[in-house]
Amino acid sequence: MVRAAIEAAATADPRDVPVGAVVFDSAGRELARAANAREALGDPTAHAEILALRRAAAVHGEGWRLAGATLAVTLEPCTMCAGALVLARIGRVVFGAWEPKTGAVGSLWDVVRDRRLTHRPEVRGGVLEADCAALLDNFFRTHR
Ligand SMILES: [Zn+2]
């Protein structure tokens, strides 16, 4: 699943930080994928997870709820995306690289597993971590 997210990240505009996300339904079929497109769209909310959630909700035919679905992403989600994952009732979040500076799925915050929430997705982090971190390392090495 994270492998597909790595493929999605590779489709990012060259100006955008390469983060990719893919949503799978409960049977493991891919519903939608997206890459971070903040620069390409000029939209501060155009993170890969948000775009993939929107597309998945549009195609899976059960409205905005993505109960039972899994979102795989190359980088630990931020607070906005973690909030959106909870709102979408996503069943499981799988991510690659940890993001100690802004991560909201276990690093800096743990938005999705806050005990005050009624919906708490399952979480698995650090999947294909080295491959996912390399995507970002390569990007920042050539852009800074
Ligand atoms: Zn985000």
Image (tube, rainbow, N blue to C red):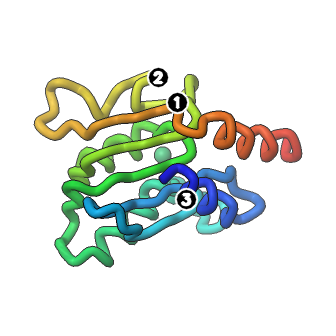
Q: Nearer the viewer, residue 125 or 117?
A: 125
Q: Where residue 66 sits in the image (x, y, percent)?
A: 24, 60
Residue 102: which disc? 1
**Residue type for callout 3:** Ala
Q: Residue at x 21, y 36 (%)?
A: 120
Q: Is residue 9 above or below residue 100?
A: below
Whether residue 48 appears in this view of the structure is: yes
Q: Are marks 2 and 3 in contact (CB under 8 Å)?
A: no
**Residue type for callout 2:** Ser
Compared across the picture, whether 26 is left or right of 15 comes to left
Q: Are marks 3 and 1 in contact (CB under 8 Å)?
A: no
Q: Residue at x 26, y 60 (%)?
A: 26
Residue beneath disc 3: 4
Residue 107: which disc? 2
Q: Where residue 65 sits in the image (x, y, percent)?
A: 19, 61
**Residue type for callout 1:** Thr
Whether residue 37 appears in this view of the structure is: no
Circle 3 residues within 10 Å: few <14, some 14–19, many ≥20: some
